[in-house]
Image (spheres, rainbow, N blue to C red):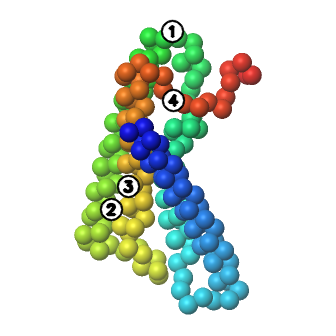
Amino acid sequence: MRRLLDFLYEASAWLAALCMVGTLAMVLAGLLNRFRPLPFGGFDAMAGYFVAAAGFLALAHTLKRGDHVRVTVLLHSVGPLQRRILEVLCLTVALGLSAVLAGYAIEMAWTSWVSGRVSLQPDRTALWLPQSAMALGVGVFCVALFDEWCRAIDARPVEVVSHFDLDEA
């Protein structure tokens, strides 16, 4: 199961990276369009969709690498039991909030797909496409938070690779 979860987080990160490449492609196409008009448009909107997708798809991988903003000073100043309680409490709140956001994102993408909503931009993009990337990213983030919550409940150390050492500060 561990390998499957790690693969899920890695795959989400790779999709985020591909979305960043898509953002670059749309920006470059928009620049090219200024000098030599292309037969289609909507590059600004597509670049925005790619940026949003990259941000949401990278959430889980970023959490597992310890790159999310964390206030570790408080955690290091309390004992092991208090630290565990704080970690479980924070992860519970984060998991609840992200689950609500994931449910909303899934419902929004589903509603857009069923109703056939399209962008108001000239490209008329089907809105369920960028919305489903958001839903997927937040869903994988929920899985990562639940993974960390289970570790905290089992009293196993939360796997966070910190890039900040308190001894250096």
Where residue 79 is drawn, which disc sits there? Answer: 1
Identify which residue is drawn at 57% across, 23% down. Answer: 72
Whole-Å distance between the Cαs marked 1 and 2?
Answer: 44 Å
Estimate how packed mark 2 is, as few (under 14), some (14 to 19) or many (20 or more) residues with alpha carbons within 10 Å. Answer: many
Identify which residue is drawn at 63% across, 67% down. Answer: 24
Amino acid type shown at disc 1 = Gly
The answer to whether marks 3 and 2 mark residues whose Cβ atoms lie closer than 8 Å is yes
Estimate how packed mark 1 is, as few (under 14), some (14 to 19) or many (20 or more) residues with alpha carbons within 10 Å. Answer: few
At which x and y percent is residue 109? 33, 62
Q: Which residue is mark 4?
A: 159
Say which label, 3 or 2, has the lower sequence index.
2
Q: Nearer the viewer, mark 4 or mark 1?
A: 4
Whole-Å distance between the Cαs marked 1 and 3?
Answer: 37 Å
Where residue 140 is drawn, which disc sits there? Answer: none
Say which label, 3 or 4, has the lower sequence index.
3
The answer to whether marks 1 and 2 mark residues whose Cβ atoms lie closer than 8 Å is no
Estimate how packed mark 3 is, as few (under 14), some (14 to 19) or many (20 or more) residues with alpha carbons within 10 Å. Answer: many
* 28 left or right of 160 in image: right
**Helix, strand or loop for disc 4:** loop
Identify which residue is drawn at 46% across, 77% down. Answer: 121
Q: Nearer the viewer, mark 1 or mark 2?
A: 1
Q: Which residue is mark 2?
A: 109
Query: Residue most toward the right?
Result: 168
The answer to whether marks 4 and 1 mark residues whose Cβ atoms lie closer than 8 Å is no
Say which label, 2 or 4, has the lower sequence index.
2
Q: Is residue 126 above or below residue 154?
A: below
Which is more toward the observer, 165 or 41?
165
Q: Quadrant of residue 127?
A: bottom left
Q: Is residue 3 above or below residue 162?
A: below
